[in-house]
Image: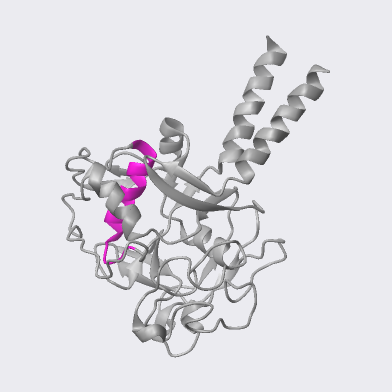
Amino acid sequence: MKKARVLIVFVCVMAAVNFASADTIRGIEMDFVTIGNAGNAGELSGKGAGGLGPDRICGAVGYEYRIGKYEVTNAQWDAFTAVAGAPTGNDSGYIYTSLFTGAQQPTNNLSWYEATQFCNYLTSGDKSKGAYQFSGNNTNPGYFLGINRDAAISSYGITYVIPTEDEWYKAAYFKPNGSGYSLYANGANTAPIAGVDSLYNGALGGLPWNVGTGTQEQNGTFDMMGNLWEWNETIFDGLFRSTRGGAYHHGPGAIVVSSSYRTSFDQRDESALVGFRIAEIPEPATLLLLGFGMVMLRKKTA
């Protein structure tokens, strides 16, 4: 009987985790979708804009995680800076002013460094502490030192990050039934309609739209096909970080929003074409399973 009661409690907790639609993290509401099928194989992706850059196997991820359902908005960014202060540091790339200013517009014109400090704040409440390591403190994070996801998980548990290119690619193009990849995030090899399903090719006057506009994509996300290029954690070349997904003005054709198109920006660049979404590691149900297993182990050995 004891075993049955434990199992019932476990199932109820799992259901609560899996069906939560939004989290409030340090006062900021963030929506996530879970990306499962851990241990999937990757696929060969394209060389990038103009045939430049290296070929790369993309999309293989050995763990479950969650990714932002939407790109980070101006409203979410403003809530962060109101409490933690604007990102700053001794590296260049901290002159942020969003060019497109509506509350539900994707926050834009920000460097990769600035995006890392948003993630750190969600993780620890301090812009300098989290997966992205800095030499200073919240008031002045100082110099960027590197990335250590494992240390952040050890210190803080759930950790918020800019998705790697693999995490981003899988969330966009890997089919939820685990059968492989599609060319577009709509789950098909058929191009989305610019300005209807997704935003690219100068549709809607060559401007971004509010997040969540258009058609929901195969893994529950929005706007991984256009709207803004999105920062990835992965280094493309030197100080350049991979960006994926296309942008509101890019054309001609849908190639820019396909899985075969890669490009990058200098991590210090602030461009109105670039924003980001966040990922959450480990996926909360995974952490719950680990904790549950530890509790059961302690009971068994007591």
Q: Is residue 250 visible in the rendered structure shown here?
A: no
Could you tell me which residue is drawn at 58 percent across and 61 percent down? 220
Asked if the magenta segment contains residue 75, the reply would be no
- Which quarter of the picture shows residue 285? top right
Q: How many marks?
A: 0
Left or right relative to 205: residue 31: right
Residue 300, compared with residue 258, is above or below; it is: above
Q: Nearer the viewer, residue 9 or 116?
A: 9
Q: Does the magenta stretch mainly form a helix, a strand or a loop? A: helix
Left or right relative to 284: residue 210: left
At which x and y percent is residue 44? Answer: 58, 71
**Residue reaching furthest front?**
103
What residue span does the magenta drawing correspond to?
107-124
**Quadrant assignment for the N terminus:** top right
**Quadrant assignment for the C terminus:** top right
At which x and y percent is residue 157? Answer: 47, 34
Could you tell me which residue is drawn at 35 percent across and 66 percent down? 105
